[in-house]
């Protein structure tokens, strides 16, 4: 199983009054990693995959331990746990080599911006996503 690795910098403005990364900011970190992951296919070789847009249908997030400001980035590992006809689920860990700060998942729906409606996952997108497929639901895919 392949995981997408994203090195995410921490910003001073990410901190809350207690000196921790604010819970909402973790969703921004996930977004940065997800966009980096999903749009790697689109620019390469002029592929239209994922270039039409996507929307988030659901987030689940478990805050494992607090993350305080520092100059070193955190790693966001992403992988796919489910591929449906018109949605996919991406799992994440925000971590350092020695500890995990957040475990999360996002249900993403490909979206046709012109028609303003969801669309199905293309064969090219599914092939790309399958490289990152792992987890109990992956066996059914």
Image: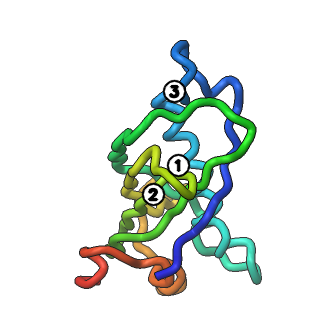
Circle 3: element type: loop
Q: Residue furthest front?
A: 98
Question: What residue does disc 2 label?
Answer: 92
Task: Give percent across and percent down for residue 27.
Answer: 49, 40
Number of other residues with Cα within 10 Å of mark 1, as a class: few under 14, some 14 to 19, many 20 or more = many
* Position above or below: 55 against 41: above
Task: Give percent across and percent down for residue 22.
Answer: 51, 27
Q: Residue 30, which numbered label?
A: 1
Q: Is residue 114 visible?
A: no
Whole-Å distance between the Cαs marked 1 and 3? 13 Å
Task: Give percent across and percent down for residue 32.
Answer: 62, 50
Q: Earlier in the sequence, mark 2 or mark 1?
A: 1
Whole-Å distance between the Cαs marked 2 and 3? 17 Å
Q: Are marks 2 and 3 in contact (CB under 8 Å)?
A: no
Circle 1: element type: helix
Question: What residue does disc 3 label?
Answer: 22
Q: Is residue 113 left or right of residue 139?
A: right
Q: Residue furthest top?
A: 17
Q: Quadrant of the C terminus?
A: bottom left
* Position above or below: 106 against 78: above
Seen at 33% across and 46% down, the residue is 60
Seen at 31% across and 79% down, the residue is 138
* Position above or below: 12 against 132: above
């Amino acid at each position: 199983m392949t995981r997408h690795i994203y090195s995410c910098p921490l910003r001073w403005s990410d901190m809350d009054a207690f000196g921790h990364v604010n819970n909402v900011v973790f969703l921004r970190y996930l977004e940065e990693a997800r966009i980096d992951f999903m749009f790697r296919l689109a620019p390469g070789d002029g592929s239209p995959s994922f270039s039409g847009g996507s929307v988030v249908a659901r987030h689940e997030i478990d805050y494992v331990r607090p993350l305080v400001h520092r100059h070193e980035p955190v790693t966001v590992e992403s992988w796919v746990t489910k591929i449906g006809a018109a949605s996919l689920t991406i799992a994440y860990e925000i971590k350092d080599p020695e500890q995990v700060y957040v475990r999360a998942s996002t249900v993403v729906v490909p979206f046709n911006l012109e028609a303003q409606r969801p669309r199905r996952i293309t064969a090219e997108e599914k092939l790309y996503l399958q490289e990152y497929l792992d987890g109990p639901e992956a066996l059914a895919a």
